[in-house]
Amino acid sequence: VMLGFFLLSGLAFDNPLNVHFSIQRLKLNLAIDLFLFIAALMFMLTIFEFLRKRPLHPFRDKRFTLFIFILIPVQTLFAHNWLTIPYYLDRAFAGSFVGEYFEVFSNLNPILIFFLAPLVAGLTAKADVYRMMILGTTVMALPTFLLAIGPNPYLFLLYILLMTIGEAMWQPRFLQWIAEVAPKGMTGLYMGVGQFPWFLTKVITGFYSGWFLMHYCPINTPPSAMNTQFMWLVYGFIAIISPIGLILVKNWMMKNFKTKAE
């Protein structure tokens, strides 16, 4: 039934039976697909029923579930590395050295993380795990606002460097935290389920990144006529939700158990 409603939605194909509700706020025209909404609702009810009958499933652990899902906002920056940055460099830096070799500049993050991850992990080996999660996500999210200033090759390189340092600070600690809070004999299950939000992040980011590129960094448009500043400002505010959320729930997260690096 759920699959049937999804196929009737606008994501599958145009259907005269489908109904769209438009909501206009802040000059944004948001359309709600009725059949897609029903399919999403049925999916959530299915998940709820699935978990209700499985008391040992990791998603029944509220702290674990909140922890992995609260990282989705900052993880969107990973997805933008291939969903947004290649197009941004090619279009916003058109006619420049960066635009001509955008393939090289858009792949700086994986090159840097190869060297920075073991280095940062070694330097912060004795640091508190949760504190490193907060600091790392903050260092990763804040540089996004540099791109909101406007297209500038030096600011972009600084963004990539700082973002990668932040990634190297929190990404290894993410798995460490999961391993420390998982019940005995369930570490593998917790680590496996802990990767689910990353899959969800790629899906969610893909839904809106194309829209932002089309409106604020369109193809065949002079860089001076683009508004990439607003696009990155929005992405920055999305990413900063993660460290703020980790700070707000810190006391509740640490209640009844204490995680620390060995």
Image: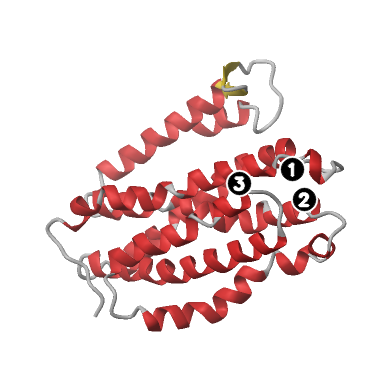
Nearer to us in this view, 34 or 258 = 258
Residue 184, quarter of the rendered image: bottom left
Task: Determine contact: label 1, label 2, CB under 8 Å.
Answer: yes
Nearer to us in this view, 53 or 251 = 251
Amino acid at the residue labelled 2: Ala
- Can residue 59 be seen at all in this image of the molecule? no
Give above or below for 211 relative to 160.
above
Q: Earlier in the sequence, mark 1 or mark 2?
A: 2
- Give the residue pinned by disc 2: 92
- Give the residue pinned by disc 1: 217
Residue drawn at the location 23% of the way across and 70% of the way down: 185
Amino acid at the residue labelled 3: Trp
Q: Whole-percent x and y of residue 58?
A: 29, 55
Q: Earlier in the sequence, mark 2 or mark 3?
A: 2
- Can residue 42 be seen at all in this image of the molecule? yes
- Give the residue pinned by disc 3: 232
